Amino acid sequence: MSNFTPRQLRAARAWMDWNRFQLSELTAVSPRTILNFEKGHTEELMPANELAIITVFKRQGIMFLEDDQGIMTKKKVADPMPDGGELAPPLAAPVTGGGGAAQEPAPTKSQKKKFLGII
């Protein structure tokens, strides 16, 4: 069983504003492998690919929660493998329509970078 789901991987990439090609360059996992996993064509990644993906996101302060509960982020610090920092709540996609009240809009790219301490 994978340590993260396709939905979580898409959320983490969206949080970092990375496309599949950028993630591929950082992890040496092919864009096709990333696409197949995200689309559900592949249930599990090879262990080395999974480790590479988890490691690159962990270095950015992103953790995958168990049981497909989403992702969590923590503030980016100078250390490439931060051990401290406050955890943010899981990301929630904005809800529109359906008669219910809309949730807060998703953060902008600038807000995400500021939160992670990149700018």
Image (cartoon, grey):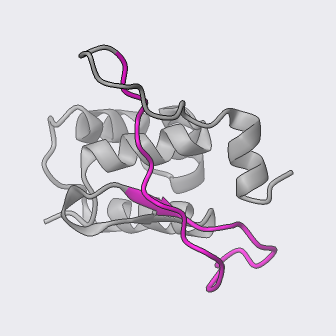
In the image as oriented, which residue stretches furthest toward the right?
A: 119
In the figure, is residue 86 to the left or right of 116? left
Q: Position of residue 65 (x, y in %)?
A: 32, 66
In the figure, is residue 51 to the left or right of 14? left
Q: Does 59 appear above or below 6?
A: below
Q: Position of residue 13 (x, y in %)?
A: 49, 42
Verify whether residue 74 appears in magenta: yes
Verify whether residue 88 appears in magenta: yes
Q: How many marks?
A: 0
Identify the main secondary structure in magenta: loop
- Quadrant of the rendered structure where residue 118 is? bottom right
The answer to which of 60 and 71 lies nearer the viewer is: 71
The answer to which of 17 and 67 lies nearer the viewer is: 67
Q: Does 56 appear above or below 36?
A: below
The answer to which of 97 and 74 lies nearer the viewer is: 97
In the figure, is residue 14 to the left or right of 61? left
Rendered residue at 59%/66% (across/down): 61
- Quadrant of the rendered structure where residue 79 is? bottom right
Highlighted magenta segment, given as a residue range: 71-96
Rendered residue at 71%/74% (across/down): 80
- Quarter of the picture containing the N terminus is bottom left
Q: Position of residue 115 (x, y in %)?
A: 72, 55
In the image as oriented, which residue stretches furthest toward the bottom?
A: 83
Q: Does 64 appear above or below 77?
A: above
Rendered residue at 24%/52% (across/down): 5
